[in-house]
Image (cartoon, helix red, strand yellow):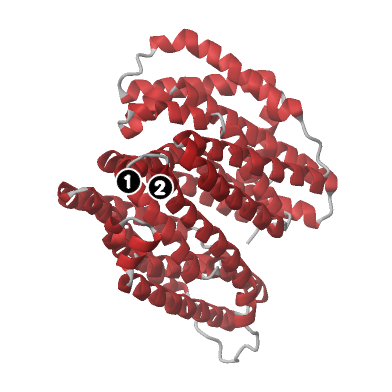
Amino acid sequence: MSKQNVLRSAAFLTFSGIIAKTVDFLFRAYYSKQLGSEGMGILSLVFSFHGLILTFATGGLGVAVSKTLSSLYAKKDYTAINRTMNCAIFSVLLLSLGAISAVCLFSENIATSFLKEPRAARSIIYLSPSILFMSISYCIKGYFYASRKVLIPASSEFLEQFVKITATTFLLKRFLPSGIPHGCEAVFLGISLGEFSSCLYLSLFYAKFRRKPEIVASQTAVFSPLMKIALPAMTASLMGSFLRMNESVLIVSALKKSGLSHTAALKSYGSLYGMVMPLVVFPLTLLSSCLTLLVPEISRADGMKSRLRLKTLISRIMRFAALGGFLTCTVLVIFSSELSSLVYSAPHLSHSIKTIAYLSPVMFIDSVCCGILGGLGKQTKLLVFSLSDNIFRLSSIFILVPHFGEKALFFTVIFSNLLTASLTLSTVIKSTKTRFELSGWFLKHLAATFFTFCISAIFLPFFLTQTPLEVVFAIIFTILLYLFSSTLFSKNLRSDISWLLGRMFLGH
């Protein structure tokens, strides 16, 4: 496949990922309204445990399959490709079925002893089948990515979303009247059905496109290369997932020690981590899709030992991150009240959204720096930074939250993001010897933000911003105003956008 086609495939994956994540966020907003803060608290607790078990079940094999098969496709060793897939699928089947059996047998103990939420027991059971379906899907997606058939895994995400939304909407109407915990069960059962449909879809296409084994047996070892990539990835992910699960449980426990009842603590946790953070981080998840285009460029420039090209590329990426971060901050701060009412029907979240929104530039810079370090092969440093951040958060929650309550929780989130961003940014600058552009990465975008705030204060009263359509038009107006002012203050922006579009569509 030509370089241009590879880039176009990556562009297609980027846009399909953006659409899928947007649909997922909108659906999350829908069931957040239905379940409220308490329900989102239960959901977040179960998701934290689910992430841990899923990491164990997949064993890092999704990434390992894609990387291993890419090298085998280059050699056209199709027998080894089939053996690799058989090995990977058998491994995830074994791990997943073992994990599901353990979860179903000990669901009550897990909910009571680990999550400290007995009402989550049945939710854990309803979500557990998704572990098997997701594990198999990861391996098959790795196969299609390696063979450059990106349309199949991309379309599977849309099927999954359709089935999940349809099933969950139907089940919520049946389950929710019986209580919030049953509403959570409906959401998890809908997720499992969505993952099943995606897994079945991918499996049918895999059976269709899977090449027949060659008569001459391949002598290429397949298990060792898989494990060489999968085990370190699984170990790092397991550590992170375990710490995140403990953080979720500790937050509720610490809030209770601060004087809140169990229900109030769960609502506070659900509001921040189940509603506010997903809204603020949503634009960041869209950026992560775009990073799939840029990280290979970083790896290529680093491999060619082209320092000038690498520095130019990083400067451009950082300017894009600053653009996205300050734009997100501007929109969320200006429309915090409207968005809290429109998205969640919870006006009381406005202040929390505005507080966390100021971190958007920091979050964008940190995310981009993590992508750059990944492209440079600095995974060990990323692991150290992640573990350091997790330890800080756990310590801060354990020591401060029982004494200062929700204020300490916001302090933890803010300082944690500042800490990790400073570590990753300094490492990128040091590793690549890239110059820190105070003007291009910060001051010009700050000026554009200030300009947008001033003009919006004059013109936004003409938008009543009471109905959803009025809010959307007002947000679009603000975004265009910010982009215009950014172009006005930064002459590099036009060339950067032209360069990115060229990479995506023209292969330049």
Q: Is residue 222 left or right of residue 124?
A: right
Please state which amino acid type lies under the numbered disc 1.
His
- Residue 34 to residue 214: above or below: above
Please state which amino acid type lies under the numbered disc 2.
Val
Q: Is residue 56 left or right of residue 418?
A: left
Q: Is residue 324 left or right of residue 351?
A: right
Question: Where is residue 248 drawn, in percent x and y?
Answer: 45, 51
Furthest residue toward bottom: 216
Q: Which numbered circle lies on residue 468?
A: none
User: The residue tagged with tag 2: helix, strand or loop?
Assistant: helix
Question: Where is residue 55 drawn, in percent x and y?
Answer: 49, 65
User: The residue tagged with tag 1: helix, strand or loop?
Assistant: helix
For label 2, the crowd category at 10 Å Cα-Cα, with few meaning under 14, some 14 to 19 and many 20 or more, is: many
Q: Quadrant of the N terminus?
A: bottom right
Residue drawn at x 60%, y 42% is 416
Name the residue tied to disc 1: 262
Among numbered discs 1 and 2, the one appearing first in the sequence: 2
For label 1, the crowd category at 10 Å Cα-Cα, with few meaning under 14, some 14 to 19 and many 20 or more, is: some
Count of numbered badges drawn on the protein: 2
| Alpha carbon distance from label 1 to label 2 | 8 Å
Question: Where is residue 77 drawn, in percent x and y?
Answer: 62, 80
- Is any atom of residue 502 visible in this view? no
- Residue 462 to residue 76: above or below: above
Q: Nearer the viewer, residue 302 or 106?
A: 106
Question: Where is residue 259 drawn, in percent x and y?
Answer: 38, 39
Name the residue tied to disc 2: 252
Q: Are marks 1 and 2 in contact (CB under 8 Å)?
A: yes
Q: Say which quarter of the image contains residue 217.
A: bottom right
Q: Nearer the viewer, residue 199 or 49?
A: 49
- Residue 404 to residue 47: above or below: above
